Amino acid sequence: MKILHFELLLFFTLSMVSIVLFLFDVYVDISVTIFLLMAIIFYVFASPRLKGRNFSKIVMIVFMAPFVHLYEYLTYGYEQRINAFGLLMSNPYSFVQPIIENMGTMAVIGSLGLLMGFLLGLDNRRHTDAENKEYRALPMAGYLLFIAFSLFFAYIDKPVQSIAEANYTASVNLLQQAGVSFNGAWQLSYVLLAVTYIDSLLSHHKTKKYLFFAALLIESYWQFSTGNREIIGFYLFLLVMVAYRIKNTKNIIYLLILALLLLVVSQVIGALRSIATDKNALEMISLMYDNFHFNRLLQGTWSAVCLTPLSVSGDYYYGLLNFKYGSTYLDYILSLPPSFLADFVGYTRPINGLAGPAWEMRYGIGGTHALVVPFMNFGIMGIYLVMLLYGLLLSKIESRLKNNNFYDLLLVGVFCISILFWFWYGEMYMVRGLMAYAFAAILYFAAVKIKLR
């Protein structure tokens, strides 16, 4: 316990020093920033305090991943070149050293906030079987209902044409064809699918497991064949669940390899959806062989989101950023009604497909990194405090894996499914995930109570 207190004091001191340096416009060299980020990652993976906290490790990687482009400045410096961020489009902010160094400091402060939250949220209490109530499994009729709902929402959300039939950006889904907006359909689908997985796991029912895997294969095909990748978050949930039950170090290594494979699959799908139109399988393979290389892994949503911290860092440096002092979070509350309901009653949500933080970015591709909104509203202290709260929340949630309780496992599933979009596109995805959780939990409760057979 004394060692933990020392580590907390060390990380807190480092955080405060970084914040003071930022506030007094002391620009930290990028080599120092990269060293600190790598040290934090090493601690997260090597510390006995975070042993077995696989979801926390994933969260830290997701938060830090876009800043992989910082390493390029160690090699190329800040001179003008075609691409300052690997294969991403350069912009005037890309070559201003203080802007890049400020962005690096912001990344360090956000990472330290997350780490402090992880440590403060640790739950070292021993959980015994007596603490867990007997699981009440879904009746088969109820289980089939969840499978059907999951498939339904996945189907209406997928583009009607595959990437071999039409360009990804040109294809629309059934909802869009009908003029209906329901941005959370995919999240609801995978949260309902998570219910079926957890129920099959806790009930030890073989038929349910077969049905779950069948639904997973169908929805995976719908996703990948149409160029979508939202289901990757669901696979992260499966990895977290399996890793929690594995004690063998060798098997954990296999899971890490699977996690890397998910990244490669995601990037392959991302590349195919722009080149696969009107191509047969052999032509697609040939194109991928010719065009896919290691640097391609640095191109995509996960790294392009680095443009949004760059935007607010540059605006802050030039005095163009007006802090919002919490108004964005109020807009989140006002944007809670689902889009189809808001459209039906004629209500315009403050944050929608045509308005919100992403539209305020000077440079970006349609999303915002997790540190952007806290910085836009409360400055550098906002990044630290909000990320600390996020880390505390996620750590407490991960601790609930020990309970082996349906509602707790489903909550973990919701955060796994949503974490990529939350940290790379914006907080509304987490809000929608929690709304899907409430719907699924109520439906499960009703199905168990009614006991339809």
Image (spheres, rainbow, N blue to C red):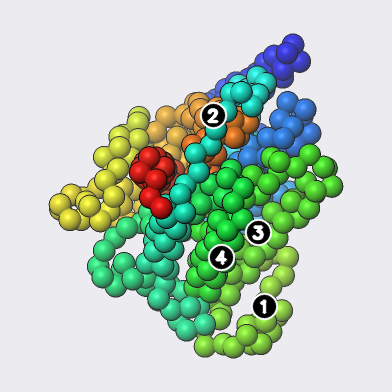
Q: Secondary structure at mark 1?
A: helix
The residues bearing labels 4 and 1 have C-alpha atoms spaced at a distance of 29 Å
Which of the marked residues, 2 or 3, is nearer the chain's N terminus? Answer: 2
Calculate the distance from the C-alpha at mark 2 to the C-alpha at mark 4: 30 Å
User: 196 or 243: nearer the eye?
Assistant: 196
Q: Are marks 2 and 1 in contact (CB under 8 Å)?
A: no
Could you tell me which secondary element the residue under label 3 belongs to? helix
Q: Amino acid at mark 1?
A: Met
User: What is the distance, in whole Å, between disc 2 and disc 1 at their CAs?
Assistant: 51 Å
Does label 2 or label 4 sit earlier along the sequence? 2
Instruction: Compare marks 2 and 1 and give the one earlier in the sequence.
Output: 2
Label 3, residues with CA under 10 Å away: few <14, some 14-19, many ≥20: some
Would residue 170 be visible to someone looking at this image? yes
Q: Mark 2 belongs to which amino acid?
A: Lys
Circle on res. 214:
4
The picture places residue 270, in percent across and down from the top left corner, at 57, 68
State the image coordinates of residue 29 (x, y, percent, origin top left). Answer: 69, 37
For label 4, the SS is: helix
- Decide which of tag 4 and tag 1 comes sooner along the chain: 4
User: Going 39% across and 45% down the picture, which residue do you hit?
Assistant: 451
* Residue 288, label in figure: 1
Which image quadrant is residue 442 in? top left
Q: In which image quadrant can residue 405 be found?
A: top right
Q: Disc 2 on helix, strand or loop?
A: loop
Quadrant that contains the N terminus: top right
Please name which of the two marks, 3 or 1, marks the residue nearer to the observer. 3
State the mark number for residue 133. Answer: 2
- Residue drawn at (30%, 37%) of the image: 333
- How many badges with numbers are in the image? 4
